[in-house]
Image: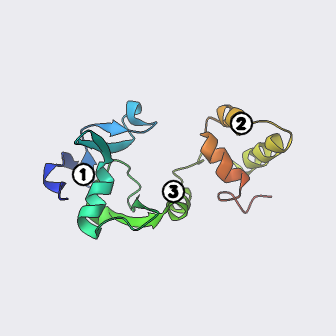
Amino acid sequence: MTFIRDFHYIVETSGCWRWIRARKGKEAKKGGGYGCVRIKGRLFGAHRLACENRHGPAPEGMQAMHSCHNTLCVNPEHLSWGRNYDNQQDAAKALRRAKKLTPDDVRDIRRRHAAGESQKSIGAIYKIAQGDVSHILHRHWWAHVE
C-alpha cells in the first residue's frame, strides 16, 4: 500500500514533514497528537503508513518510532520500527514524558501510591497522565531516584 503521494504536510527547517490534516490522540485538540488517515472506513496513523512505505510492514508487536520526537512528523527518514518499550525509553530520554517533575516529586508520587492513592489521582495532582505515573512506579522512568 503506497499512500505517501496522498500525504498532506509542510516541510519544516528541522526536516520534519508536519502533518496538516486530521489528527488523533489526547493532544489533538491542542494542535498536537498524531496525524491520521481514514481508508475504507478504517483509521490509520499517518506516521505508521509513512514508516511502512519506507521500511516495509511492521514486524509483529512493533510500532513506528519518531527519531525527531515530533508526533506530527511523517518524514519516513525520521521513522523506524521499534518495540513499545524502546519507544517509551526514547521518549523519556528526550524528556517528552514527565519532564516537569523533580526527584522530590518522583519520591512523593511513589510515597502517595504506597499509601493507597490511585495512579489517576496522583496524575491529576502533578498534571501528568496515569500512564506516566505507572512508568514512574515501575521504574521505567526515573529508575535512579530512590
Pointer 1: what residue?
A: 12
Which x, y percent locates residue 41?
26, 38
Q: From mark 2 to mark 1, how far is it between C-alphas?
A: 37 Å
Q: Earlier in the sequence, mark 3 or mark 2?
A: 3
Residue in the picture at 39% in, 66% down: 81
Disc 3 residue type (three-letter): Ala
Q: Quadrant of the N terminus?
A: bottom left
Which x, y percent locates residue 49?
27, 55
Disc 2 residue type (three-letter): Ile
Residue in the picture at 36% in, 66% down: 80
Whether residue 53 is visible, yes or no, is yes
Q: Which mark is residue 91?
A: 3
Identify the coloring: rainbow
Which x, y percent locates residue 123?
66, 37
How many residues crowd mark 3 within 10 Å: few (<14), some (14–19), many (20+)?
some
Pointer 2: what residue?
A: 122
Give the camera-side residue of 44 and 79: 44
